[in-house]
Image: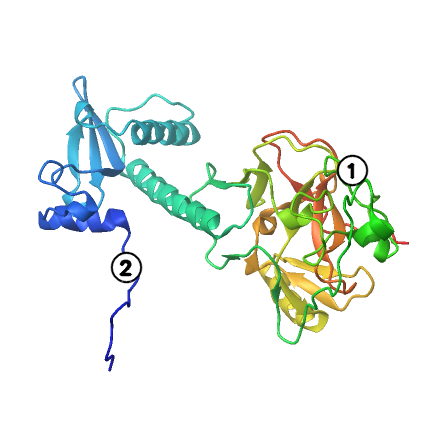
Amino acid sequence: MAENLKGCSVCCKSSWNQLQDLCRLAKLSCPALGISKRNLYDFEVEYLCDYKKIREQEYYLVKWRGYPDSESTWEPRQNLKCVRILKQFHKDLERELLRRHHRSKTPRHLDPSLANYLVQKAKQRRALRRWEQELNAKRSHLGRITVENEVDLDGPPRAFVYINEYRVGEGITLNQVAVGCECQDCLWAPTGGCCPGASLHKFAYNDQGQVRLRAGLPIYECNSRCRCGYDCPNRVVQKGIRYDLCIFRTDDGRGWGVRTLEKIRKNSFVMEYVGEIITSEEAERRGQIYDRQGATYLFDLDYVEDVYTVDAAYYGNISHFVNHSCDPNLQVYNVFIDNLDERLPRIAFFATRTIRAGEELTFDYNMQAPPHS
C-alpha cells in the first residue's frame, strides 16, 4: 500500500478534447479546460454522415464530436461553420459518384450505400490523421511525415512500430567506436584522412553534402568521439531524414508507397533502411513466413559476409513503405559511424538523380552494389 504519494502524478489517458467533451456532456464548466458558460453549448462537428436537398435548402446529417451516433442531427447548411469538413465531404462524394456512375452531379438524396461509404471514409481520415500524428511524435528527424489515402478505405497498418535507428535483436552487439578524428576542418584539412582515412577509404561528401563515391564504396562518417561538431560536412546520414515525405496509397495495387514533397538533388541522402537486426538464420525462418504472406522486408547486410539481416516488417521507419522498381531513383550505400563492424553497416539511400517534388521514391529490392575495393 502506498504510504507517501506526495509528488506523484498519473498521466491521463484521455485527450484534452475528450475531457472538454465530457464537460459538455455533463453540462459542467471547467476553467482549466477552457469550458465556460459562454461556450458550454458550442458543439464541434466530427464528420458529416449524409446529405439531402429539400427544395433549395441543403441539409447534412452531423456526427457531433463526443456524442454517440444516436445523437446525430440533420442541420441546414447555414448552421455549419466547418468549411474544411464540408469541402472534404463533397470532394469524397464527387469522387465516389464518378467511380460508381461516371458522373459528379450531387443527387438530392444519397442512397444508403453511398452515405455509408462517406461515413467510412470520414472515419478512415480520422484514423490516418491520428497515425500521422503518432509517426511525427515518434520521429527524431527534421523531415515531417504526412499520410494520404485517396484510393480505398484501408487505414493504418495494424502491426508496425516506427523507430529511428536499428533495434538490435537477441545475441547481437553493436560495439561503440573507441576513437574519433582530431580534424579542425574535416573536408578541407583532414588530419590523417579524417575518419575515412583511418579506415583507408576516401571522404564521401562534397561541401553540399552530396555523396561523391561510386556505389559499392563504404561511407565512413565522423562519430561521437570526433572533435568536429554537429555542422561537420562529414555528418550527413546521422542527421536523419531532412525532406518532408508522404506515405500514400498507390492506385495500382502496390499498397502503400512513399513520395517526396520536396525536390531532392542528385546524390543527396534521403533516408536509412531501419529495422530489427537479426541473424541470417532467424531471417531464413522469418522469410519463409513472409513468403507465405506475399511480402518481405528483409535486407541482408552482406557488405563483407552474410551474417546479419535487417527486418523492417514490424519495427521500421518510413523506408518500410518504399516500393520496388527496376529503374529506381534511390541507391544503397553502406555507412559506418559509431559502429565499425563491417558485418553491421547502416544502410543509406541516396538519390541517383534529381527527384521532383511529388515523385514516388523507389529502390531495387534486388539491388547489388558493385564490389567494394
Identify the mark at residue 326; answer none if there is no mark: none
Give the number of marks: 2
Quarter of the image where the N terminus is located: bottom left
Camera-side residue of 202 and 125 = 202
Q: Amino acid at mark 2?
A: Cys
Q: Height in image: 373 above or below 3?
A: above
Camera-side residue of 268 and 59 = 268
Residue sitting at x 88%, y 55%:
200
Residue sitting at x 18%, y 17%:
56
Q: Height in image: 172 above or below 272?
A: below
Is residue 154 in view from this perspective? no
Residue 151 located left or right of residue 32: right
Q: Are marks 1 and 2 in contact (CB under 8 Å)?
A: no
Camera-side residue of 8 and 181 = 181
Mark 1 sits on what residue?
206
Is residue 289 in view from this perspective? yes
Rendered location of residue 229, percent (x, y): 67, 48
Quarter of the image where the C terminus is located: bottom right
Mark 2 sits on what residue?
12
Rendered location of residue 168, percent (x, y): 62, 67
Q: Disc 1 to disc 2, how far (Cα)?
A: 49 Å
Q: Nearer the viewer, mark 1 or mark 2?
A: 1
Rendered location of residue 167, percent (x, y): 59, 64
Residue sitting at x 45%, y 50%:
137
Specify the color scheme.
rainbow
Numbered disc 2: secondary structure: loop
Residue placed farthest to the bottom in the image? 1
- State which tag comes first along the sequence, 1 or 2: 2
